[in-house]
Amino acid sequence: MTKPGEVYRVDLGMGGKVRMMLVVSREDSDAPRALSICVPITTANRDSSYEVELPARPFFKAKSFANVQGLQAIQHHELREKVGVIFGEPLNEVRTALRYAMEL
């Protein structure tokens, strides 16, 4: 089970690469599937409403952004290593960007 705001390294497989992903799905110990909804973390900023600048953390090597257009369901067994947590206002900004992206 994962919690919102947790950051994991995820191996995206076939031609993908290991990248950090931010869990945005709710904590649910009774979910019917072992999936977490995540957004990728990137260092490429296109200065759009789909990207949220994240605060500096020891597990980031450079300025990093949550890219909500890359929203994906990740199976729990694909979550390799928990590297840290993003919480508070930065996580709220990611949620706001998700609402914008999905017109919610």
Image (spheres, rainbow, N blue to C red):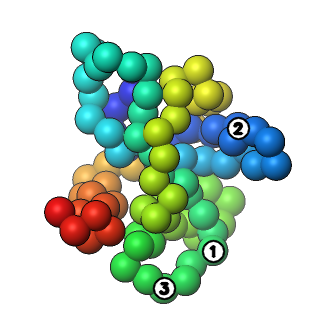
- Percent x, y of residue 23: 42, 42
Q: Residue furthest bottom?
A: 47
Between discs 2 and 3, the one toward the N terminus? 2
Cα distance in 3D space between marks 2 and 3: 26 Å
Image point (60%, 63%), residue name: 42
Badge 1: how crowded within 10 Å, few (<14), some, or many (20+)?
few
Image point (32%, 68%), residue name: 101
Q: Is residue 74 left or right of residue 85?
A: right
The answer to whether residue 41 is above or below residue 86 is below
1 and 2 marks in contact (CB < 8 Å):
no
Q: Which amino acid type is shown beneath numbered disc 2?
A: Asp
Quadrant where the image shows the C terminus: bottom left
Q: Which amino acid type is shown beneath numbered disc 3?
A: Asp
Q: 90 or 17: which is nearer to us?
A: 17
3 and 1 marks in contact (CB < 8 Å):
no
Which residue is identified by label 1?
Answer: 44
Q: Is residue 91 left or right of residue 60?
A: left
Which residue is identified by label 2?
Answer: 11
Badge 3: how crowded within 10 Å, few (<14), some, or many (20+)?
few
Which residue is identified by label 3?
Answer: 47
Image point (26%, 53%), residue name: 88
